[in-house]
Each structure stands twice: as C-alpha cells, then as structure tokens.
Image: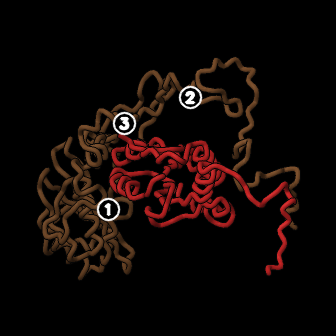
Chain colours: A red, B brown
C-alpha cells in the first residue's frame, strides 16, 4: 500500500490542468527554441554573448545547436556575402519545419554599410525572415527581446494545423 | 596630400570630380645616397637590366623587365638576404596606357631594408609566378588573378581566391563599379532561384537615403503604437510593451515585480 496521500480537495480538486492541444504544442515550441549557430560577422559576437553566462539564453530554452537538423530558429547574425548566399539557402532547407528566421543587425536586414558588389542586400532576398532586429550590432538585450517576441508570435499562431510552409517564392 | 579646394557649397556641386586620381609623388633621391642599396643595385645590375632605380621614403624602387622577375627575386633571396616577400599585387593603369604595373615588396630582416621591385605588363599578358621562391606569393597571385584578371604562369592552383569560382568580372579594376555590374547584382538570385525569379524578388535597393511614403505608417512612435491605418492625432494612449501575453502562458509563471526581490547592492 502506498504511503503517500493525495488531497483531492486541495486547490479545488484533482491535480489536473486543462488546456488545448494548440496551447501545449505552442508552449513546447516557443519555450525550446533551439537556435542555429550562424554568426557571420561582428553580430555573431553579440549572439555568443547572449548565449553565454551573463545573458544566458538557456533560461529561455534557447540552446545553440551546430546542426540545422536540430534547430528551430536560424539567427542570421552578420554580413551575408554573395559567395555565402547559396549555403544559407541550403542550411535553411535542411532545417525541419516549423522553422523561423531572425535577421540580426543592419547587414542581415539590408546589407547595412556594405553597399558593395559582394554583399547580399538583405538576407530576405534569399530566405523568408520572421523578425528583423535593428542595430549595428544589436545588444544581447535586443536579441533577447527579439527571441521573446518570436515566442509571442509562435504562441499567437494555431499549432494544430500543419505548419504552413514559408517560401520566399 | 590633395590640394585644398573650398568645400563651402558641397551640396550644390561635387568638389571631387577627377575619377581616377593620381597621387602626387613624394621626393625621390638617388640610389648612391645609401650604401646598402647601392651595393644591392650593383649586384642586380650585374645580371639583369634595370630600367630605373631610385629611393623614395627610405625604400629603393627598381623597375625591371617582366621576364626577369623570377631571376631577380631569386638573386635577391639567395644572395642579397631579401628573404621575405611581404606583399605583391598590381596597379591598374588601363585608362592611361593599357598596362598593369606589378609590384613586389621585399624585406630583408638582416639588413633592415625594403626594396620594391616593379615592372609593367600589357593588358592580357601573364606574369611569371614566384610561388616556387616565396610561399606567400601563392595566395597573392591568386588574389591578383581574382581582382585584376592577371594570370600567373606556373602557378600550382590558378583559381579565384576571394570571389566565387563562377564569378564574372574583376572587382579591383578601376572600371568595375563599386556596387557591382548586372551580373553581380543578380548573382545570388540567378544562382539559387534562376533568372526567372528576378521579377518576383526584384532589384536590390541600394539607395541609402530612400524614403518610402509608407514608412510613417509602418513605423510608429515607440511606446505609442497604433494599429495600421489609424489616423495619428498625437494624443494616443501610451502602450506598455510586455514580453508575455496578458492572459499568461500555460505552465510559465509571469514575473511579478511586486513579489520579486531586486538586489541593488553590487557588493552583496
């Protein structure tokens, strides 16, 4: 005979929480946003700082992964050159759905100060972007805020339906 | 130094108009003024033709024939103690007389002297590789090929080094536009999605001063955001941004500032 006692009258009844499938799936997705390590330039340093102990992304469930197959969100941190553009597309295609993209910093947003022949003028010319973070480079707080907004966006969507594939074209 | 020109009315008229600016020369002195350089020059002159030689900013500059470069650098490395090739590249004089000027910056650590070896080649002519003498010439010659289109004979791996292999054009030519030609502008779109995607993705927006007439609608005043299309009167309610939905998130506790303790003593 088990010795523990469940007080079924405490807290208004049974130890059961009621919710919807949408909410619990979105809760899982939004609180374990594994980010792909994608530091391309100086924004990558801020991204690393956000992942390290002072800002500690782990407490939001955001853990950096080195493989696109294990990650949910791609944080494009830095200048995307034209030589590299085919690889960002390939890595994006290798991520499993649902997947999200954060464009971090001026260079990833618009090409930034690099108005030259070798720089892609905005990563959204290659892959669809969910969130644009301004700044050169954005502080780790900005990236934290961005991830929190992305969590908010994920929770606002219906999870029950199949994730609508995001395609640039 | 560039000659001073008044910049009072720079908005009305561009004060800098000469496109391919040629820098004024600093004073040159004769090679005989420096003993070490004079003896080096004698050793080189004994075996190769030297077209011109002078000292400029405490460095000797010599002009030689293009086909002598391997022999001159070999002589300098093995007998004159110039054991390092610190830099080499080309200068574009195509607009002036359809030539490239190739320079090799040599350094002697024992003599504490630098010599710059130079020669001219015609447009389309190849140079002799010195990669067998100096390993540093390997990537430098590849970069010269990438940026100017000058090939180096006998180079072990004559391919582009910075730009992609399928790139067209040589970016460091003075005729190459900084923002790229049409090939560069559509490079990533053509390569990933194909030429038919150009209409869908659209051209690059490179005007940094571009003002979109919708910008005032899309970007609202921080802290006073209103739904899109709302007429802005100026007395909007302040909108406090919260990281979490008002109703809370399932199984995630919202931070309560009242019940949390703020540690304000940094020496705790």
Q: Is residue A113 visible?
A: no
Looking at the image, which is closer to me, A58 or A83? Answer: A58
> Residue B11's spot in the image, x, y percent?
48, 24
Q: Which residue is mark 3?
A: B204
The tally of labels here is 3
Q: Residue at x 37, y 36 (%)?
A: B204
* Mark before the other along the chain sequence, 1 or 2: 1
Q: Residues within 10 Å of mark 1 (few under 14, many from 20)?
A: many
> Residue B174's spot in the image, x, y percent?
27, 44
> Residue A26's spot in the image, x, y percent?
59, 51
A14 with respect to A82 (left or right): right
Image quarter in which the N terminus of chain B is found: top left
Seen from this angle, which residue lies furthest front?
A1
Q: Which residue is mark 1?
A: B55
Q: Which residue is mark 2?
A: B218
> Residue B165's spot in the image, x, y percent?
23, 57
Q: Is residue B267 visible?
A: yes
* Mark before the other along the chain sequence, 3 or 1: 1
A6 with respect to A110 (left or right): right
Q: Residue at x 24, y 60 (%)?
A: B160
Distance CA(mark 3)–CA(mark 1): 48 Å
Q: Residue at x 39, y 43 (%)?
A: A167
B189 with respect to B150 (left or right): right
Q: Residues within 10 Å of mark 3 (few under 14, many from 20)?
A: some
Q: Label 1: chain? A: B
Depth check, mark 1 against mark 2: the one in front is 2
Image quarter in which the C terminus of chain B is found: bottom right
Looking at the image, which is closer to me, B125 or A62? Answer: A62
**The quadrant where residue B205 appears:** top left
Distance CA(mark 1)–CA(mark 2): 62 Å
């Amino acid at each position: 005979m088990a010795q523990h006692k469940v007080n079924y009258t405490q807290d208004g009844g049974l130890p059961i929480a009621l919710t919807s499938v949408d909410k619990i799936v979105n809760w899982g997705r939004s609180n374990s946003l594994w980010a792909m390590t994608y530091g391309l330039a100086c924004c990558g340093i801020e991204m690393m700082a956000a992942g390290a102990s002072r800002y500690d992304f782990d407490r939001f469930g955001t853990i950096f992964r080195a493989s696109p197959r294990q990650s949910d969100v791609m944080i494009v941190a830095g200048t995307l050159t034209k030589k590299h553009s085919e690889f960002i597309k390939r890595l994006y295609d290798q991520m499993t759905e649902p997947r999200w993209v954060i464009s971090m910093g001026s260079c990833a947003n618009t090409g930034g100060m690099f108005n030259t022949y070798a720089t892609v003028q905005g990563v959204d010319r290659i892959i669809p972007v969910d969130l644009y973070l301004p700044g050169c480079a954005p502080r780790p707080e900005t990236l934290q805020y961005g991830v929190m907004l992305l969590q908010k966006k994920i929770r606002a969507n219906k999870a029950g339906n199949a994730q609508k594939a995001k395609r640039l074209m | 130094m560039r000659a001073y020109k008044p910049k009072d009315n720079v908005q009305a008229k561009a004060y800098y108009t000469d496109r391919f600016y040629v820098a004024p020369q600093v004073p040159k002195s004769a090679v005989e003024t420096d003993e070490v350089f004079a003896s080096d020059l004698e050793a080189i002159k004994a075996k190769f033709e030297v077209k011109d030689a002078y000292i400029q900013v405490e460095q000797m500059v010599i002009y030689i024939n293009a086909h002598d470069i391997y022999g001159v650098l070999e002589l300098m490395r093995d007998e004159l103690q110039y054991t390092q090739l610190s830099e080499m590249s080309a200068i574009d004089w195509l607009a002036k007389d359809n030539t490239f000027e190739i320079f090799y910056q040599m350094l002697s650590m024992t003599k504490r002297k630098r010599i710059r070896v130079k020669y001219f080649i015609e447009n389309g002519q190849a140079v002799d590789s010195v990669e067998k003498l100096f390993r540093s010439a390997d990537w430098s010659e590849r970069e010269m090929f990438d940026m100017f289109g000058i090939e180096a004979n006998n180079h072990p791996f004559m391919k582009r080094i910075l730009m992609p292999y399928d790139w067209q054009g040589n970016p460091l030519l003075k005729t190459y536009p900084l923002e790229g030609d049409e090939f560069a502008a559509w490079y990533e779109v053509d390569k990933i999605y194909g030429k038919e995607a150009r209409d869908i993705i659209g051209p690059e927006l490179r005007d940094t001063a571009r003002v979109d007439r919708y910008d005032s609608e899309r970007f609202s005043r921080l802290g006073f955001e209103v739904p899109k299309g709302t007429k802005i009167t100026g007395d909007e309610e302040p909108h406090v941004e919260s990281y979490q939905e008002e109703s809370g998130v399932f199984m995630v506790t919202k931070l309560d500032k009242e019940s949390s303790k703020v540690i304000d003593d940094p020496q705790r």
